[in-house]
Amino acid sequence: MTTGFAEPSGTSVALLLLGAGADPNAERGVSCPGELPAPSDPTLVERAWAAKRALGERLFVLGHHYQRDEVIQFADVTGDSFKLAREAAARPEAEYIVFCGVHFMAESADILTSDAQKVVLPDLAAGCSMADMAAIAQVEAAWDLLAELDLADSTVPVTYMNSSAAIKAFVGRNGGVVCTSSNAKQVLTWAFTRGQRVLFLPDQHLGRNTAVLQMGMSLDDCVLYEPHKPNGGLTPQQLREARMILWRGHCSVHGRFTRECVDEVRARVPGVNVLVHPECRHEVVTAADYVGSTEYIIRTINEAPAGSAWAVGTELNLVRRLANAHPDKTVMFLDRTVCYCSTMNRIDMPHLVWALEELVAGRVPNQIVVDPDVAAYARVALDRMLALPG
Ligand code: 13P
Ligand code: SF4
């Protein structure tokens, strides 16, 4: 198997797991103030282009690869979360950054841009179920437990980009760093120069897959911390001996792919190459031929020979776009059933047009503003990542 997810190349199920009262969308305020245009309005595309033209250089639109086609056409830059974080940081001249992606990405953009720049998320309900699986109070309780056991000083917290600004700030305050699926190996390598073990948040799969497939660790080096259980469901000895303490979080989109999906497609399509994202379960990743970040997946399909066949385990908008872009190759979705990221899909034409037209009218809708203290520490953790080679 080829693993590309650590190469320097360039997210409602969660509520069931969160327990009563913890509705992140409610906390974010999902209502969309003002009038949304009707989805059936035939002038939406024209209106979006007109608003974009009117805003000119003052506007910079970022689009994650999992966005709908109808939206992605308006992006000035498309990318995975790593590339988009870098792009946001590199545009000091843009007054408005409209983020076609999810909440944690827009928070990161706000953290990495100046106070004069305003980051807009066209629909505040565009969250990420994985990011919502690690609440700051739970993470602080886990850290307190490690401190009581005298383990905090030798543990480096690492959080996946898919986490709230509060988690990133926690990590920054405690000597840790952010990672993405593009650089998880480099980040873990850095972390193990500073401590004996890593507390990896919130995606257990990215943590486990990177540790085992790229860092030479064994599954026994990894323990699963379950935030709803006393002491995470772990004994002091398990915590002491672990090299990777994996938070029990996962992506509800990538978590759907199973080992059976891989076996089924191999039986159906002889010679097919199975290419998956490292947010997939370990047994899926180990059964695949290639594993890597969204950018890696795109690059791999771009470079594949004509006539080759690919079953891709990632979000459906991206897989469809790749299939359409490569009619000379067979590009199919790994699962038999469709699987969009429902929160990524919240950003649609009505919300985009509404957001852009509000900006043209001189109003800033759905601005994402991270508390300055939180932002300062989150920036420490993001800057540590951005300073790593790659
Ligand atoms: P990347 O953009 O880092 O590949 O992550 C995929 C994802 O699930 C984003 O929410
Ligand atoms: Fe979150 Fe998964 Fe959607 Fe990415 S694809 S935004 S990790 S739920």
Image (tube, grey):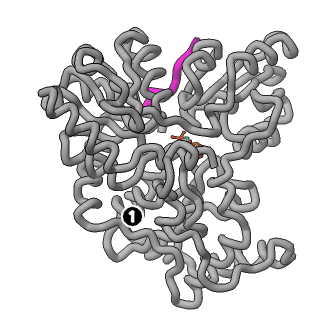
- Tell me residue 171's x, y (percent): 27, 44
Task: Residue at 25% x, 23% y: name it.
Answer: 197
Q: Which residue is mark 1?
A: 110
- Tell me residue 385's x, y (percent): 31, 41
Horizontal relation, residue 110 to residue 127: left or right: left
Q: Nearer the viewer, residue 179 or 24?
A: 24
Horizontal relation, residue 108 to residue 355: left or right: left
Horizontal relation, residue 239 to residue 215: left or right: left
Q: Confirm whether residue 378 shows in the render.
A: yes
Q: Is residue 5 magenta?
A: yes
Q: Nearer the viewer, residue 21 or 56?
A: 21
Q: Which image quadrant: the N terminus?
A: top right
Indicate whether 199 appears above or below 57: above
Q: Amino acid at mark 1?
A: Asp
Q: Nearer the viewer, residue 312 or 244?
A: 244
Looking at mark 1, is its residue's CB closer than 8 Å to ligand 1?
no
Q: Is residue 151 magenta?
A: no
- Tell me residue 265's x, y (percent): 80, 18
| Helix, strand or loop status at disc 1 | helix
Tag count = 1
Q: Main secondary structure of the magenta part?
A: loop
Indicate whether 361 appears above or below 231: below
Q: Nearer the viewer, residue 253 or 84?
A: 253
Question: From which residue to which does the magenta span run?
Answer: 1-8
Dividing the image into four equal quarters, which quarter contains ligand 2? top right
Task: Residue at 58% x, 90% y: name it.
Answer: 361
* Mark 1 surroundings: few (<14), some (14-19) or many (≥20) residues within 10 A: many
Q: Which image quadrant: the C terminus?
A: top left
Q: Residue furthest bottom?
A: 361
Indicate whether 209 appears above or below 135: above
Task: Residue at 66% x, 64% y: name it.
Answer: 74
